[in-house]
Image: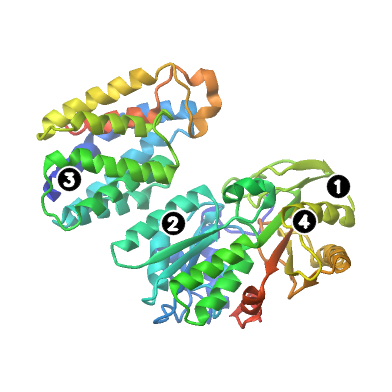
Amino acid sequence: MKKILNRTEDYVLEMLEGLCSAHPAYFKRRGAEGRVLVRPEAPIAGKVGIVTGGGSGHLPVFTGYLGPGLLDACAVGEVFASPGVELMAEAIRAANGGAGVLRLYGNYGGDVMNFDMAGETVEFEDIRTTTVLVADDVASAGPAEREKRRGVAGMVYCFKIAGAKAATMASLEDVTAVAQKAADNCHTVGVALTPCTVPAAGRPTFTIGETEMEIGMGIHGEPGVRRGPLRTADEITGEMLKMLLADMPLKSGDRVSVLVNSLGATPLEELYICYRYVARELAAKGVDIIAPLIGRYATSMEMTGMSLTFCKLDTELEALLLAPCDCPFLRC
Amino acid sequence: MTTNSIRWAISSLKEKMDGAASELNKLDGALGDGDLGVTLSQGFRHLQDDAPNLPDDVGMALLQCAQAFTRVTASTYGTLLATGMMAAAKATRGQNAVPWTEIPQLLGAALKSMSDRGKGQLGDKTVLDALNAVRLATEGLDEPAAQVKAAIQAVDQTMADFRGHPFRRGRARIFGDKGLELDDPGMVALKRIIQSLI
């Protein structure tokens, strides 16, 4: 293992300490060991709170997206491990300004179980909660089993859109409905070229040949749909584009936002090479791209690879996507 | 059943589950990640620390137990047990004493909640099958000693009934035919838990 760290057991806590000392205007810590991150202004009276949570190792997901027009609190687990019920309940309490709290997070068994249980816990404190699961990874289950899909980079759009809606002081029902609409309209596919190493494990999560790639691999190294020789940027992007379009057909006049996301090690240069291909293909179909995002938005530690997300927009989603927001990793 | 009965159960569980831990770890290790025993003994030890602070409201006491359990254990079995406690907590909130005859009803609520959360069904050869048998066996009994006795018999009978059946849930299902004659570690753990209540 070749990483810049002190002790593996301090990895997450030292990361949180650094994050908060770099951005005190956006983050403060609470809960056991300070493993719940909260916006300093939270709870905001009368505003629906939005909480998320999950394992570390994906920055800026999940912790990074707290701020005005975005999320209110986040429960932070160890690398690739669920934070557990107590931290999630604490995040919900921190976000509750009296108008209820939306739990908005990626579809992973352990997180779902724990967040549901956290919701039940705070029911005893008369806090109303709802849930929207982000399940956008098209490689993890077919369209007929959409609810079984894992949540990956599409989360960023859901955070942005739901956060903008909550900032208008909309009701819990309305924020939940628009978050669900955003989640339903997000579709992602990824490709991995090299694995990553969880510090506590000390060795890579999987092995892959020097000249191989795997299409559809998950952000924890979950198996993808096809492993084969590494191809050119256009061939890789073309294959991923085809998978997305098979899942969500687009026609002339449609409007989408496109996220080309680095899984950690892949540089911006390569992301722009891929974006150029997507932009050209969508333009040829008469599809308009709105506010594209290119960069490191949802990572898998130092994994080499990228993911491509489409978020199909209607008038409401587009306005919310373009509404102001502010956090260290996303501003508009 | 009062908060004092819960305190007594916790201290008995803490004392006796330590002894069962290595057996349960071994059983679980043959099929899964081998942490079942340690999960439970840690969970009950933590409950014991919390026991003096439990409120008189049985529902709130059970809620506090569920929360204490989830603080120390992230395993599926631990979360499911806490889920069951939480369901019972909801049903008994606001009561300082719950008639023993309501135990089957509380087990029913726990069972439903655990089945929803773990996406498990009766017949999958999991702790849910044993719990359902206990629910049926304790129906109509109004005395805890008789309920415990009937419950142990019910779990034994369920384990016997499922020998020859495959596991349908969790990592154990990949064992296919090799799992036919093995008992579900979750059922064995439930038996040890109930046995601790004598």
The percent coordinates of residue B192 (x first, y second) are: 27, 29
The percent coordinates of residue A257 (x first, y second) are: 72, 70
* Foreground label between 1 and 2: 2
Q: Amino acid at mark 1?
A: Leu
Q: CA distance from mark 1 to mark 4?
A: 22 Å
- The answer for which chain carries disc 1 is A
The answer to whether the residue labelled 3 contacts the one labelled 4, judged by CB atoms less than 8 Å apart, is no
Q: How is the image coloured?
A: rainbow
Toward the viewer: A292 or A185?
A185
Instruction: Work out whether disc 2 and disc 3 sit on a shared chain.
Output: no
- The answer for which chain carries disc 3 is B
Please tell me the numbered disc located at residue A55: none
Toward the viewer: A248 or B108?
A248
Within-10-Å neighbours for mark 3: few <14, some 14–19, many 20+: some
Q: Earlier in the sequence, mark 1 or mark 4?
A: 1
Instruction: Work out whether disc 1 and disc 2 sit on a shared chain.
Output: yes
The percent coordinates of residue A316 (x first, y second) are: 62, 76
- The answer for which chain carries disc 2 is A
The answer to whether the residue labelled 3 contacts the one labelled 1, judged by CB atoms less than 8 Å apart, is no
Q: Amino acid at mark 4?
A: Leu
Q: Earlier in the sequence, mark 4 or mark 2?
A: 2
Per the image, label 1 sits on a secondary structure element best described as: loop
